[in-house]
Image: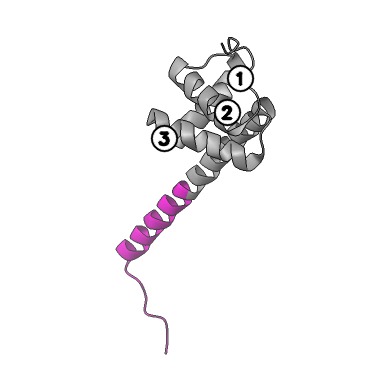
Amino acid sequence: MGRVPREPDDEIGRLLELQEEIDQLKEAVTSHAVVDQAIGMIVAFGRVTPDQGWLVLKEVSQHTNIKLRNVAELILIWAREGDMPQQIRAELEDALDRHGPTQIPGAPPAP
């Protein structure tokens, strides 16, 4: 039994599906890298374990209703430029208070 030839439209459709899958996988890899880098920043500045860093990042995302990847991007921007939206800073401080021993460097001292 031989292989049944595909119609050109079927092949084009399959190629488009595969390209879309490749694009989604590339996005997932990039997103994962951003999240991992943000967890690294939380670990370094918050003196927490990587598991605690993941929990901190997840809690900040949940409490601010901002996608986890976007929170991670904001943390990386903060690391490069020193700027962080107040809402994210407050939630990050609260989460680190729950999970870690320190507050965000440069933040006003706790009362």
Q: Magenta stretch: dominant SS?
A: helix
Could you tell me residue 18's position as x and y percent? 43, 57
Could you tell me residue 24's position as x and y percent? 45, 48
Within 10 Å of disc 2 (Cα), the crowding (few <14, some 14-19, many 20+) is many
Could you tell me residue 87's position as x and y percent? 43, 19
**Image-based side of 85 in relation to 101, left or right:** left
Q: Decide which of 21, 42 is in the foreground and name it.
A: 42
Q: Quadrant of residue 111?
A: top right
**Residue shown at the point (51%, 17%) measured from the top left:** 84
Q: Which residues are magenta?
A: 1-24
Q: Disc 2 to disc 3, how far (Cα)?
A: 14 Å
Q: Which residue is mark 1?
A: 104
Name the outermost residue toward the bottom. Answer: 1
Kind of residue at badge 2 = Leu
- Determine whether label 1 and label 2 are within 8 Å by CB: yes
- Determine whether label 1 and label 3 are within 8 Å by CB: no
- Residue 63 lies within the magenta run: no
Q: Nearer the viewer, mark 2 or mark 3?
A: 2
**Residue shown at the point (63%, 31%) measured from the top left:** 100
Between disc 1 and disc 3, whose residue precedes?
3
- Determine whether label 2 and label 3 are within 8 Å by CB: no
Between disc 1 and disc 2, whose residue precedes?
2
Could you tell me residue 105's position as x and y percent? 64, 16
Q: Disc 1 to disc 2, how far (Cα)?
A: 8 Å
Q: Which residue is mark 2?
A: 96
